[in-house]
Image (tube, grey):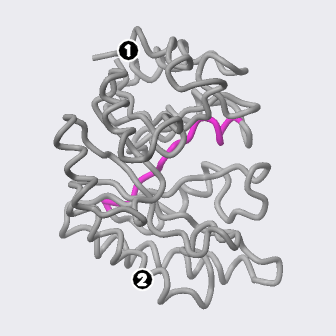
Amino acid sequence: MPKFAANLTMMFNELPFRARFAAARMAGFRAVEFLFPYGHDAGLLLTELETHGVRVVLFNLPPGDWDAGERGLAALPGREADFERSVTAAIEYANTLNCKQLHAMAGILPPTVDPDLAMSVYINNLARAASELKPHGITLLIEPINTRDMPGYFLSRTEEARRVIDGIGADNLKLQFDIYHRQMMQGNIIHGISGNLDIIAHMQIANPPQRLDPSAGEINYPYVFQMIDGMGYEGWVGCEYKPLTTTKESLDWFEPYKR
């Protein structure tokens, strides 16, 4: 049976961030993920995790200036030093929170930048970051993100991510397979998972077209979960969706999967 982690950036927004850990556990989740913890004291977040008996399984490296529209730094020429600092910051939080997976967002490529140059920067940055993370027992993840929601995002297709991962060859560089983004860009979800199961370390879910909960959209998630289970996938599945109403009302789909 799949293991689900509540995404505390998207879910339980009815509550202040630190109160969401307790809410997630009360709803039946044993793990959480979130986008960026950096505005919060890591020690206080650790207290929430320990108090409520949940673990954090994923968060992102600092993405640059989010409010200015930046969505990651890994593929941006000229921002290598900023990316390096983001890795350092993420390691500090990950070690405090005992989180063993970090997602490096590629970034939105300006139209004037040569894509080949960006790819070279991306590969070098990821290889270096994976090497820095390895002594900490941390796996670095990359995630194709659909360009309808995020126009210009550098990494948008599964096969592109596969080429990068295979090309670098680091055993702690893996794929974050977001089913919502895959459906928006390519469809053929089951084939995408089965053909890349060897490099998938984390999955995420939401239902197109509005990125809602698994029961509110075009994907037949009970079938997808059954297939994932049958493939022997053992990683976490992050619930990175927007509840249509309240989070509690969006969780009917979760009842059969509570552990």
In the image, the segment drawn in magenta is 171-183
Q: Are there few (<14), some (14-19), or many (20+) residues within 10 Å of tag 1?
A: few
Q: Earlier in the sequence, mark 2 or mark 1?
A: 2
Which of the image's four quarters has the C terminus? top left
Q: Nearer the viewer, residue 155 or 33?
A: 33
Instruction: Give the image quarter of residue 6.
Output: top left
Callout 2, which amino acid? Answer: Glu
Q: Nearer the viewer, residue 14 or 249?
A: 14
Q: Which residue, given by chain and number where applicable, does mark 1 sit on?
A: 257
When the figure is inspected, residue 83 is found, relative to residue 173, above or below; the finding is below
The span from disc 2 to disc 1 (Cα, nearest Å) is 39 Å
Q: Taking 253 as reference, is 229 left or right?
A: left
Residue 166 picture location, percent across and down: 46, 60
Instruction: Give the image quarter of residue 153.
Output: bottom right
Q: Taking 153 as reference, is 88 left or right?
A: left
Q: Nearer the viewer, residue 65 or 227?
A: 65
When the figure is inspected, residue 110 is found, relative to residue 95, above or below; the finding is below
| x 79%, y 49%: residue | 148
When the figure is inspected, residue 193 is found, relative to residue 35, above or below; the finding is above
Residues tagged 2 and 1 counted as in contact (Cβ below 8 A): no
Is residue 175 rendered magenta in the image? yes
Q: Which residue, given by chain and number where applicable, does mark 2 sit on?
A: 84
Residue 243 picture location, percent across and down: 60, 28
Image mark for residue 93: none
| x 47%, y 38%: residue | 15
SS of the residue under disc 2? helix
Which of the image's four quarters has the N terminus? top left
Callout 1, which amino acid? Answer: Tyr
Instruction: Give the image quarter of residue 246.
Output: top right
